[in-house]
Image (tube, rainbow, N blue to C red):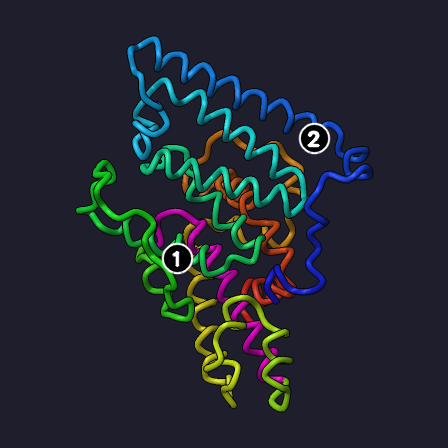
């Protein structure tokens, strides 16, 4: 079931009295980070004016922001705000973090800060499965294109919309399995959500269309062809094949990730590493931080991973 379904464990989207009492330090950190972002923006605009620039530095450098050395303290401060927001387990905090990440990518299209690895997990927490898939497909296609010029601001940017989430996963799987974990981890979750939906429909063949629609996530909810299909069996088996392929690809890239996802407490209680190398426990830790909430807010998605780890899927 997708994270926007009834029973969603995310608390209400506001910092209530009890929340403030329990998480005062976290709320104070967010307040400090907001002030820091505002201060860094003020400094950046002042530097821009002193250099004789009469225009808006945010608009003039939009898309190329990271190339402007003076912009980096601002971007780092904004990343700090995102990090502090992710410590607050509310829908409002997740939405604000996603909004910041979207805007930071618009400012710096080359993404020198790895924002592309942080955003999909937040979109999945918010039930924006289609947007997350479109985002990851654009980045994956672009990174596989040796001719793509990230410095060319005239090229389309994040222009994939409405991609087929049921399509084969070959795009995301390389041989040998190299590259970032986030697309494969998040596409695995999307496929598991779709699998949950199809299995739910398969168990209720006589249910009304409205009842079926209410029982599934945001993508299948809009697909009457799927909702009206009598037999989901072949499509369920295809999704299972895709999930297994994604699982194996992630495992080969980083053997630490899936065990950490299935038993996250030990890893999540450790300080977040400042850097990591591909395939390392540190990489697994950082990727877990970006994605653990979206997985555990989705019913039953770690169970198939545990079965795959036992080799009995």
Q: Which residue is mark 1?
A: 134
Q: Which type of secondary structure does the marked residue at label 2 adopt?
A: helix
Between 186 and 250, the one nearer to me in the picture: 186
> Does the segment drawn in magenta span residue 201?
yes
Residue at 48% across / 50% down in the picture? 120
Q: Secondary structure at mark 1?
A: helix
The residue that mark 2 highlights is 27
Q: Residue at x 75, y 34 (%)?
A: 23
The quadrant of the picture occupied by the N terminus is bottom right
Which quadrant of the structure image shows residue 214? bottom right
Residue 117 coordinates in the image, percent (x, y) = 45, 44
Q: Which residue of the protein is positioned furthest toward the left in this rendering?
A: 147
Q: Is residue 185 left or right of residue 10?
A: left
Dominant secondary structure, magenta: helix
Q: Residue 224 location, x and y as percent?
A: 49, 80
The residue segment tinted magenta is 177-203
Name the side, left or right, on which 216 lies relative to 112. Answer: right
Give the spatial CA distance, label 1 vs label 2. 33 Å
First of labels 1, 2 by sequence position:
2
Outermost residue on the front side: it is 54
């Amino acid at each position: 079931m997708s994270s926007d379904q009834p029973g969603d464990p995310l608390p209400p989207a506001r910092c209530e009295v009890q929340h403030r009492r329990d998480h005062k330090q976290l709320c104070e950190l967010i307040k400090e980070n907001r002030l820091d972002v505002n201060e860094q923006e003020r400094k950046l605009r002042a530097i821009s004016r002193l250099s004789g620039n009469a225009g808006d530095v945010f608009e003039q450098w939009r898309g190329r922001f990271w190339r402007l050395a003076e912009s980096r303290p601002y971007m780092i401060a904004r990343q700090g705000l995102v990090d502090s927001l992710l410590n607050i387990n509310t829908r409002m905090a997740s939405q604000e973090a996603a909004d910041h990440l979207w805007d930071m990518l618009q400012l710096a299209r080359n993404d020198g800060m790895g924002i592309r690895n942080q955003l999909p997990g937040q979109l999945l927490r918010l039930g924006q499965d289609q947007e997350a898939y479109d985002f990851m497909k654009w980045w994956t296609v672009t990174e596989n294109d040796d001719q793509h010029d990230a410095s060319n601001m005239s090229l389309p940017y994040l222009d994939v919309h409405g991609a087929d989430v049921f399509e084969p996963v070959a795009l995301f799987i390389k041989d040998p399995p190299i590259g970032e974990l986030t697309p494969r981890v998040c596409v695995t979750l999307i496929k598991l959500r779709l699998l949950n939906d199809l299995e739910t429909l398969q168990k209720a063949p006589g249910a009304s269309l409205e009842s079926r629609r209410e029982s599934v996530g945001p993508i299948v909810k809009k697909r009457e062809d799927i909702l009206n299909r009598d037999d989901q069996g072949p499509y369920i088996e295809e999704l299972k094949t895709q999930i297994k392929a994604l699982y194996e690809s992630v495992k080969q890239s980083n053997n630490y990730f899936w065990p950490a996802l299935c038993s996250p407490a030990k890893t999540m209680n450790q300080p977040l590493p400042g850097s990591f190398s591909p395939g390392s426990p540190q990489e697994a830790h950082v990727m877990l931080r970006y994605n653990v909430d979206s997985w555990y807010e989705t019913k039953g998605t770690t169970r198939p991973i545990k079965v795959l780890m036992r080799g009995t899927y």
